[in-house]
Image (tube, coloured by chain):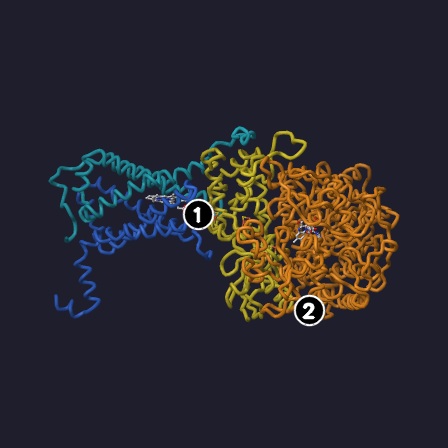
Amino acid sequence: MKVEVRIKRYDPERDQKPYWSTFEVDVEPIDRLLDTLNKIKWTMDGTLTYRRSCAHGICGSDAMRINGRNRLACKVLMRDVGSRVTVEPMLGYPVIKDLVVDMDQFFEKYKSVKPYLITYDTEPGTERLQSPEERERFDEGTKCILCGACTGSCPSIWGNPDWVGPASIVNAHRFIFDSRDQGAAERLSILGRKDGVWRCRTIFNCTDACPRGIPVTDLIEQVKRAIVFNDTKNA
Amino acid sequence: MYQKFDVVIVGAGGSGLMAAMQLPNASVAVLTKVYPTRSHTGAAQGGVAAALGNKEEDHWKWHMYDTVKGGDYLVDQTAAEVLAREAIDAVYELEHRGLPFNRTKDGRIDQRRFGGHTRNFGEGPVMRSCYAADRTGHMILQTMYQNAIKNQVRFFNEYLVLDLLINDGRACGVVAMEIRSGEIHTFHAKAVLFATGGYGRAWRVTSNAFACMGDGMAIAYRRGIPLQDMEMYQFHPTGLYKVGVLLSEAARGEGGKLLNGKGEYFMERYMPTMKDLAPRDIVSRCIIQEIKEGRGVKGNGIVGDDYVYLDVRHLGAKTIAEKLPDITDFARNYLGVEPLTEPVPIQPTAHYAMGGIPTDIDGRVVLDADWTPMPGFYAAGEVACVSVHGANRLGTNSLVDLIVFGRRAGKHMAKFIQENDFVPLPSEPEGFSRELVSRLLTSTGGESAANVRSTLQNEMNDKVYVEREEKGLRTALDTIDGLQDAYRRIQLQDKGKNFNTELMEAIELGFLLDCAEATVHGALARQESRGAHFRLDYPKRDDANWLKHTLAYRGSKAHDVRLEYKDVILIDDPIFKPKERKY
Amino acid sequence: MLSRLYGGPRPAGGGFETFSWYYFRISGILLVFLVIGHITLTHVTTDVACTTYSFVAARYANPFWRLYDWLLLTLGLTHGVNGLRVVIDDYVRHPQARLALQGLAAVLLLVFFMLGTITLITFSPVNAAQWGPACVGGH
Amino acid sequence: MYKGPSGMWSWLLHRVSGLGLLLFLFIHVVDISLLSFGPNVYNEGIELFDNIIVRFLSLALIVAVFYHSFNGIRIVLVDFWRRGVKLQQPMFIAALVLTIIAFIPFAYFVLRPALPFLAQGAYWFVDVNAIMSTH
Ligand SMILES: Cc1cc2nc3c(=O)[nH]c(=O)nc-3n(C[C@H](O)[C@H](O)[C@H](O)COP(=O)(O)OP(=O)(O)OC[C@H]3O[C@@H](n4cnc5c(N)ncnc54)[C@H](O)[C@@H]3O)c2cc1C
Ligand code: HEM
Ligand code: SF4
Ligand code: F3S
Ligand code: FES
């Protein structure tokens, strides 16, 4: 089938401002959008630039704005996008080139919430014990692949790039509610600050964008409650 | 730009990060061409094997036995011992660092069965695979990255390493291109670790990421370091048809069966006892056999007639939803097939390099059959060949390899940098890399990199696949020779410096061609069938002549690779004596 | 469990943003009743055209209504200006401009709060004969 | 703007209605302060509200109040009620429906005094001659 692909292009080395290129591509209905981009890059325009690696939705490289919503190009099938598809870089991040955005800030924010196990006890000789229920408590957040789709979909970050963003909160949640961890208080105090969880106005775009099906807003709300009630048990 | 570190680690997958963790007091730079969390380790689903014995009795020696046998005895048995013994501690280390393993009722790390892992030297399956849902690799990668943040490891993200610097027989640094600016940087170091992963992209149908282009192997190879056992490349039997995306072995573990075009569950015919759960090399071969004999699936609307089915319909919606969510997801998403009501088209997919840069059990790269190390140069993970996987890797043993040997290499480097000083850089360290980049940017040869790449991938899929024979391999060699010529004529459309992925892909293609070349040479020379290497013209294993490792040294072009051989290390224990491999 | 979770340093108090978030919700819920009561009074039970001086004077004879309106004023202003502050935070990136606008918001809050409060407290109706019509306009 | 059925419209409306209400509150405080200047001044001020255009503006105000209130309650439920997150969309619809339901009687009461005038307007719209003949 024939598809018209509109791509927002920008190479600061050459272009004054972003522009649109349109490509007519012949695709299979079960081709991924990523396959289509590859086809364009390899046979039509070698300068088209985007990130990709695993090609099956697990590495988080190719989050972009597809028909107005943040998606992984490798998880979108051509038969589902219609005969015209619009591809843009994600909003909320500086554009490096074409569909490639600068993720440095994103990772800095991620780091700011101390996304690692914090313990003050000495380690046992074998594993620490944790019941299946305790393990289940923070399962959702462990699915995150740090693709940044959620953060880039959030109107709060479009206006305010300082905001820590949903992805960082998801990863903070993963540790705050881990029974082995002892750093909950530190993280909650970081997230309780000005650019912490309160910038979330429950817009739910993040939940729509997450390619891993993480209930992002739900996790954020749990963190808010943990801060408000100063308690991680009932949040 | 010039920078100096005690240790430079190339690659931020499981092995690179595990090594970085062992160097808390050194200045360490981790260079990676993708953001660390995009590394291919994240794709691993099944689990990581360790004889913890949390669910039932287990012993590291049983694990060692399975590893040696699974590798069709091409395994260095001392290394297999280290692997099996230290896996236990390494898994505990992961847990301490925060890895969220699934748990048993009494709170310990949960374990499950996996192909080829047995109790009491082959008596029956054992629960040895420690796992975190269906995303163990993802969790290892995330956990290691989190710890790297905690320890404030210095990352150089989106730096493509182009060259290894050697002076006076010692590794002393690397040269890399910063993808975002096109700038060339020199990293001077006392010790260099390569942890760059595999080269599955040499085949058309592969489970591997676009980033798996054999960079590390090729860079070392170009610097005169041999590549070991490259002909031993694993094809996983259940790759999603055409796309290659992996459907985990768990599908068959749960009772899924392979079905041919005639509606027959054919594995029963080939392996009456283990049936669909026979090791990967064997199952892949049976699939190819079916297709060759005309029992593949034909014209059902998708394309071609070179596949069979993975059938999970009889498992019921509940099991499928709970235990095999990924399979359902992939099949629906990528082929539009509903596994609850339709069988899923599959074909063997290029999956894992057993071979690679030869190392000893401390991750030190060795240069020849006499185990002469190159001081300061280390390798770990899929890029390396400690030879624990021999001719066929068992499921879940790669992640063990990463953490055990990544850890050992890290610890050894910690010692090495204490005892050794910097060696000066060679003169004009960046010369080679600059020339490589500028040649590609200025070439007007008119050749397209995409063409070269797809020709290579098709050729490898056709002739250097599950089954090989002399004629096909010779043709493949000619093709690669031609492609290497074509490679020199590659012309780019993007001549910019800023994030030039076309340039990057072209550089990687050069690496891929080198790895393919070594693979074909090794395969052509090895006149026997062992593990993943099945020669139609030599269908029997031949221990008398071929119980040895291939070492391939690069020549000036595809046709003149020099091969040497290295003995397999056997230990003096009757249990581990090579014998026929039966399941 | 909790002592374990909070084994590390304690959180640095709730913080202003936490308070602000909480305040939005509490004042909001109170406002639901106050505002809906208020508009019912001025639009349903009485037409706006009849909310004249005489209507107000009669109502303010009872201090309850003064308190009611003062609560409405205070909660509405603080809630609303806090919202304005958040909006400014979200969209105004330039630090000086942001400070200036937030200063302006604070001044607005203060001015309108004073104006409203003074009116409510000091209001003492003139002689009933001079209250004027019960309704304005031609209806 | 982000496409798709998320909570973005609810948030945008909430923000706009909140700011609108604040603006009105400012105006309202000023007109109330006219009380201090005696009945005549105040009543003149009130007269303004009787104006047909202002009556329509009051309708907008009322919609804003109801929407902002109901959606405010929805937000609080999302925050404090664990199932709220899953039901945010139905609750958004509910807030809209409730806004409309509550709005109808209010619209009637607000516009009732203006009805004759409005009826005339409608008439005029239908038939200019009809208006001509009534004068
Ligand atoms: C789909 C799939 C499922 C799997 N499942 C399992 C399983 O269940 N159990 C198991 O044990 N194994 C499994 N494996 C195998 C295992 O995941 C891999 O072998 C292993 O993760 C490789 O890890 P690594 O650290 O060697 O390299 P990788 O994780 O591949 O990382 C390579 C790193 O090197 C960097 N790099 C590469 N080249 C350059 C360069 N030129 N310059 C700079 N940086 C560079 C990359 O950026 C990356 O960070 C699976 C593999 C696949 C494909
Ligand atoms: C009638 C009952 C009211 C309720 C239940 C209510 C509730 C809320 C809530 C919960 C918020 C916080 C939104 C968030 O954090 O995302 C909010 C924001 C806001 N409210 Fe109200 N409110 C009410 C009345 C008012 C009034 C009378 C005004 C005007 C004076 C007002 C102006 C605002 C403003 C400006 C915001 C900020 C909007 C934003 O940040 O997006 N509200 N309201
Ligand atoms: S929460 Fe989801 S959308 Fe956000 S970074 Fe993680 S995986 Fe991506
Ligand atoms: S889109 Fe943004 S406002 Fe909150 S619910 Fe998601 S983070
Ligand atoms: S390429 Fe890895 S997520 Fe799409």
Q: What label does residue D16 carry, if any?
A: none
Asked whether disc 2 touches disc 1, contact meaning CB atoms under 8 Å apart, the reply is no
Chain C tint in image: cyan
In the displayed structure, does residue C97 sit left or right of residue D42? right
10 Å neighbourhood of mark 1: few (<14), some, or many (≥20)? some
Residue drawn at the location 17% of the way across and 38% of the way down: C58
Looking at the rendered structure, the secondary structure element under dot 2 is loop
In the displayed structure, does residue B119 sit left or right of residue B263? right
Relative to the observer, which residue lies in front, B279 or A121? Answer: B279
Looking at the rendered structure, the secondary structure element under dot 1 is loop
Residue bearing the label numbered 2: B294
Q: Position of residue C2 (x, y in %)?
A: 51, 30
Q: Which chain is yellow?
A: A
Can residue B439 be seen at all in this image of the molecule?
A: yes
Task: Tell me the CA gap for discs 2 and 1.
Answer: 52 Å
Picture layout, residue C19 above or below residue B352: above
Q: Quadrant of residue C42?
A: top left
Chain B tint in image: orange
Residue bearing the label numbered 1: D86
Chain D tint in image: blue
**Type of the residue with mark 1:** Lys
Relative to the observer, which residue lies in front, B410 or D109? Answer: B410
10 Å neighbourhood of mark 2: few (<14), some, or many (≥20)? some
